[in-house]
Structure formats: structure tokens, C-alpha cells
């Protein structure tokens, strides 16, 4: 049995890629918002049913440019979740803004609107929610809160490319959404990012933010970075729009297999199924209750690793554990924040079409062994 890693990139057919690259080579225009790039933007705008879809060099530059484009006052605060990838909090900091952490809902693991409310100060300028593991934030409650307090609402939708809710596109929520198109993401351009918004007035500012603030040959009108996507990456994206759906279908089937295995054991569960939400199929999250299951997340992680099945403790550590944010409070309704309580229980299982029936069987055996051990211990006690 081959080793199984947590993620495996979806790649286009190499001959197809070559055909597109020959077009690029013929023009010698390899970046700076050229033909492939513009085609991909048009296709993404249509696919995600959103008027503005701007490409970036990464999910991180997409997040940064989204905040630059909103022109949030220097030094103001952005409320976000500690249960996310480092990029979310770092993008806030890199824009000269201050991340403020609010607790999560114990079921959806996304921002708890009441905790967000408790974190609002006179310096708050925006809320940045993360649709973790493809589960969708409580968008309506967050929007109501932001409307009441005059705040901008952003989403890190890196896990949610193919998610949608009750017919509403994930890309059209709040003021602006940022996606990562990194190789580990289901729809990927190897490295890349995307910002979407319903606000067509923001399109120009997003374009300036990703291109050094250059307005014209002789005018630089605002602060910007180099956040541009190259033609090579855009070509991969154009082809992956056609390769990703089959991978997504394979993952849906794998999710059903995993669900069956874990539902057979006390103390194991996966992400909540939200009403009217269609899953992106980006991650499979396993939540381990060590008391009920009888073994910890770390025990399971190590046992799987011994069989060369590499799951990932994700997200672990959480943002407030990093040296740069350590000591910052997590605003919460609870004495012990939910994020603190559950961070040691989360494990993302390998989730892609490279998982064979043998791999799945090995995972089922490992889980059953640990669970059996726990039952024996409990009976002896
Ligand atoms: C992947 C990811 C990012 C970062 O995207 P890059 O493309 O790697 O810069 C940001 N936020 C979340 C939640 C992610 O999973």
C-alpha cells in the first residue's frame, strides 16, 4: 500500500496544458493580466454567479488586496476567528490592521456572532469570517451585526469554492470574499487566489491593489502589492475547471465511506450538515472526543502515521498559539473559549481520489483497534 497524504493536487492533462502554453509562448505575453488570465476571470465570474471575480497570485495576496481595496482606516481592528490557517490573521496584520479574535460556534466551528459582538470596540472596522472545512458562516447574523455597527464584512472562502447555500453563491456574500487556488485546494491553479464581490465599484480598487497601485503609466494612486496571476497559472486554472468536478464527485463518495466508518464509533463525529448548504468537498474533518472514544486525536494521528496514512492536525496550533499573537484574548461567551476546548480534537483525514479501498480499510481497522482498546480499558476499570 502506497503512503497516503492528506491532500493531492488536481492536475490537468499535460498535453492539454501544452496546447494552452503554446498559445502563450506565441504571444510572449506571460503575465500582467493577459489573455488566459482574463478568460479565467470571465469563466469564474459565470461559474460563481458573481459580477466581480479578480485573480491573484495566492489566497494570501487575495485577502490582503481585499482589505487594501476596502481602504480600512490604518490601525483599525478586524475581528476574526482563531481557528483558521495563519494566512487569515497575517493578511490583516500585513495591511497595518490589528486582528482581534472572537470565539467559534461549537457545532459549525465558524465565528459565533455573539462572540463577535462582544469583541466590537470603537476601533473595529471589519469582520473577517472563515467558512472552515466547507461549513458556511452564519452569514445572515454576521451581516446584521455589521449593518448595525457600520462594519465591512469579509469572508475567507478558501475551503468553500464549490459550496453554496440555498441557491446563493458563496462568492456573493458580505462585501467581499477571498479564495485560495493553491495546489491543495480542490479547484487550483498551482498557486493562486481569487477575490469576488457583488460591488462593481470595488473592482477597480482590487485591480490597483494587485498591481502596485499603478493607475496609468505616470500615476500611482494608492498602496498596492504585486498580487498578479501569471498566464501559466491561469492556463492550469482554465483546464482544472474541467478536471475538478470529477475529483469532487470521487470525494463525495469517499465522504460517504468515511461517514459510515466513524458513525459506528462513540466519540467520533464529522462536521455538521447545515440546512440548504452544499458541501465544497475540500476537507473531511474528524472530531475525536477522547473521553467517549477512549483515545485522543493525537493517538489516532500517530497510529495512522505508523501505517503511512498521513492525516493532518488542522487547525493546530490555532492563531492565538503562534508567538506573534500569543496572549491575545479570544472574546467568548464561555469561560474557556470553544476554540481552546476543541483545538486538540480536530483531525483532517486524507481526502482525495488517491485513497484506495485498501487505505480506507486500513483507516477503519486503526479506528476500530483504538476504539476496542478503549472499551476494554473501560470494562477493566
Ligand atoms: C489555503 C488557505 C489560505 C491561504 O491561501 P494561499 O493560497 O496558500 O496563500 C488562506 N486561508 C485559508 C483558510 C486557507 O485554507
Image: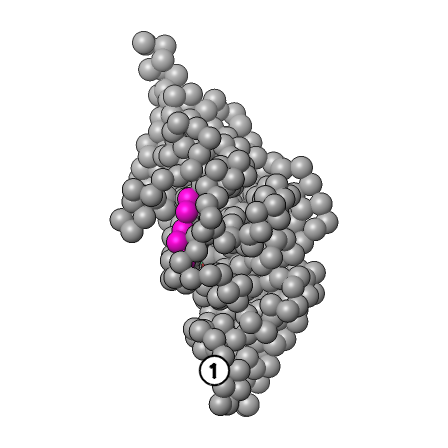
Q: Is residue 302 above or below residue 68?
A: above
Q: Is residue 100 above or below residue 8?
A: above
The one nearer the camera, 75 or 33, is 75
- Percent across and percent down for residue 300 are 36, 33
Residue visible at 33% across and 15% down?
377
Determine which quarter of the picture holds residue 23.
bottom right
Determine which quarter of the picture holds residue 320.
top left
Q: Say few, some or many: other residues with alpha carbon within 10 Å of mark 1 (under 14 / 14 to 19 / 20 or more).
A: some
Q: Is residue 99 magenta?
A: yes
Left or right: 256 as drawn, with respect to 185: right
Question: Could you say whether the residue bearing mark 1 is in a helix, strand or loop?
Answer: strand
Q: Is residue 158 visible?
A: yes
Count of all numbered marks drawn on residues in the image = 1
Left or right: 273 as drawn, with respect to 265: right
The one nearer the camera, 276 or 128, is 128
Residue visible at 31% across and 37% down?
302
- Percent across and percent down for residue 81 are 45, 45
Q: Is residue 139 above or below residue 363?
A: below
The one nearer the camera, 29 or 241, is 29
What colour scheme has been applied to the protein in the rendered image?
one colour
Identity of the residue furthest to the right in this view: 167
Q: Is residue 30 magenta?
A: no
The residue range painted magenta reads 97-101
- Percent across and percent down for residue 226 are 43, 75
Determine the main secondary structure of the stretch shown in magenta.
Answer: strand
Quarter containing the C terminus: top left
Determine which quarter of the picture holds residue 293.
top left
Residue of label 1:
220
Identity of the residue furthest to the front in this view: 122
Amino acid at each position: 500500500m502506497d503512503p497516503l497524504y492528506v491532500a493531492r493536487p488536481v492536475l490537468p492533462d499535460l498535453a492539454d496544458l501544452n496546447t494552452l502554453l503554446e498559445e502563450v509562448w506565441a504571444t510572449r505575453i506571460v503575465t500582467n493580466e493577459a489573455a488566459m488570465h482574463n478568460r479565467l476571470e470571465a469563466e469564474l465570474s459565470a461559474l460563481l454567479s458573481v459580477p466581480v471575480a479578480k485573480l491573484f497570485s495566492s489566497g494570501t495576496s487575495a485577502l490582503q488586496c481585499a482589505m487594501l481595496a476596502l481602504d480600512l482606516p490604518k490601525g483599525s481592528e478586524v475581528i476574526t476567528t482563531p481557528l483558521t490557517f495563519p494566512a487569515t490573521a497575517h493578511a490583516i496584520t500585513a495591511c497595518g490592521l490589528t486582528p482581534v479574535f472572537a470565539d467559534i460556534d461549537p457545532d459549525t466551528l465558524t465565528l459565533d456572532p455573539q462572540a463577535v459582538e462582544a469583541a466590537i470596540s470603537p476601533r473595529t472596522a471589519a469582520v473577517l469570517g472563515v467558512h472552515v472545512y466547507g461549513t458556511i458562516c452564519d452569514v445572515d447574523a454576521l451581516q446584521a451585526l455589521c449593518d448595525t455597527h457600520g462594519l465591512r464584512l469579509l469572508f475567507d472562502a478558501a475551503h468553500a469554492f464549490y459550496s453554496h447555500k440555498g441557491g446563493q453563491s458563496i462568492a456573493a456574500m458580505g462585501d467581499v470574499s477571498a479564495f485560495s487556488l493553491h495546489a491543495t485546494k480542490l479547484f487550483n491553479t498551482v498557486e493562486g487566489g481569487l477575490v469576488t464581490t457583488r460591488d462593481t465599484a470595488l473592482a477597480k480598487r482590487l485591480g490597483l491593489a494587485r498591481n502596485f497601485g499603478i493607475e496609468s503609466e505616470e500615476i500611482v494612486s494608492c498602496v498596492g502589492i504585486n498580487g498578479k496571476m501569471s498566464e501559466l497559472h491561469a492556463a492550469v486554472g482554465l483546464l482544472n475547471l474541467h478536471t475538478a468536478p470529477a475529483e469532487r464527485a470521487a470525494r463525495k463518495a469517499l465522504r460517504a465511506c468515511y461517514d459510515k466508518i466513524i458513525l459506528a464509533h462513540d466519540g467520533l463525529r464529522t462536521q455538521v450538515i447545515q440546512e440548504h448548504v452544499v458541501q465544497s468537498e475540500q476537507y473531511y474533518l474528524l472530531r475525536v472526543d477522547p473521553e467517549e472514544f477512549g483515545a485522543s486525536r493525537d493517538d489516532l494521528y500517530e497510529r495512522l502515521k505508523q501505517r503511512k496514512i498521513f492525516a493532518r492536525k488542522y487547525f493546530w496550533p490555532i492563531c492565538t498559539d503562534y508567538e506573534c499573537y500569543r496572549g491575545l484574548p479570544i472574546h467568548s461567551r464561555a469561560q474557556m473559549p470553544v476554540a481552546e476546548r476543541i483545538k486538540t480534537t480536530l483531525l483532517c483525514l486524507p481526502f482525495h481520489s488517491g485513497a484506495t479501498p485498501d487505505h480506507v480499510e486500513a483507516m477503519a481497522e486503526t479506528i476500530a483497534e483504538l476504539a476496542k482498546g478503549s472499551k476494554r480499558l473501560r470494562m477493566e476499570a
